[in-house]
Amino acid sequence: MACKSDYILLQAYADGELDAIRTVEVEAHLRDCPACQQVIENLNVCRVAVREGLPRYAASSNLTKKIRSALPASAPARRTRIVNFWPQVGWVSALAAAVALGFFTGLQRGHSGRLLDEAVASHTRSLMAAHLMDVASTDQHTVKPWFEGKINFAPPVVDLSSAGFPLVGGRLDELDHQTVAALVYGRHKHFINLFVWPAASGSLPDGSAESAGYQAISWTHGGLNFVAVSEIPATELDEFAHDYRAQAN
């Protein structure tokens, strides 16, 4: 990537507008380019300055009454909460905990429910803290060997690019006070975190759930637990899990 000619690409990356493959390419470039790192830092500083420096105006009570009176009687007034996802490290952990809180309330609580909650929190944290991958590659023969010597099991790494879920990398994460493998796949502009760890401490039941815009699917196979988490539609995550299990088995 030519640093002097790709400012627009860096802007798109900072705004989260790139697809999964291009995001991986930019992040790989940023690791070795201090100049582009500074560009991203400047863009983030500018964003914060605009957000905090511009004046905000609240609607007057008279205007609020006029708007509500103009609404049809069958349509009750609603308050819309706008969540601003500015990438600030200070509230990443709080956001992850808030998303995880109450997740999977439809499933049986206890040990397995807590593990699923942790997986959702880890997925959120990886996106917001810019720590999605320790190894960035679309090649399964690069990602799989990277885990050797770092964990005492071999996570199945499969190529699902033909199904529309390209492998983009992997990292080490932690669930239930143990190190786990996190395989990262792409889906359009979104990411799927697939957490894998030995089932020796307890198998997860096959299941799926949705909350706060996040989808999750869990299963156990071959002595390993799997949890796939993403914000993509449930039907697409179902498709991912089906394709992954078909190739990994």
Image: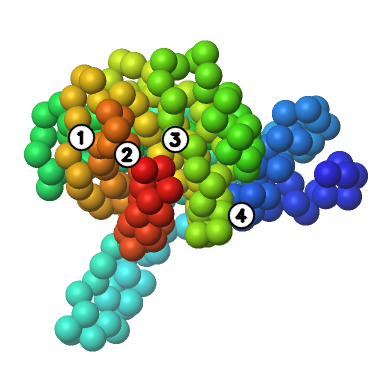
Res 38 → quadrant: top right
Q: Disc 2 on helix, strand or loop?
A: strand
Q: Measured along the vertical axis of the image, is residue 146 above or below residue 159?
A: above
- The residues bearing labels 1 and 3 have C-alpha atoms spaced at a distance of 17 Å
Give the mark nearer the N terminus: 2 vs 3.
Answer: 3
Badge 1 is on which residue?
A: 204
Q: Amino acid at mark 3?
A: Pro
- The residues bearing labels 4 and 2 have C-alpha atoms spaced at a distance of 23 Å
Q: Amino acid at mark 2?
A: Val
- The residues bearing labels 3 and 4 have C-alpha atoms spaced at a distance of 24 Å
Q: Disc 1 on helix, strand or loop?
A: loop
Which numbered tag is attached to residue 156? 3
Give the mark nearer the N terminus: 1 vs 4.
Answer: 4
Badge 2 is on which residue?
A: 227
Which numbered tag is attached to residue 19? 4
Choose mark 2 or mark 3, whichever is in front: 3
Instruction: Residue at 58% x, 38% y: name it.
Output: 140
Which numbered tag is attached to residue 18? none
Res 235 → quadrant: bottom left
Q: Quadrant of the N terminus?
A: top right
Asked whether residue 243 is in view, the answer is yes
Dot 3 surroundings within 10 Å: few (below 14), some, or many (20 or more)? some
Q: Quadrant of the C terminus?
A: top left
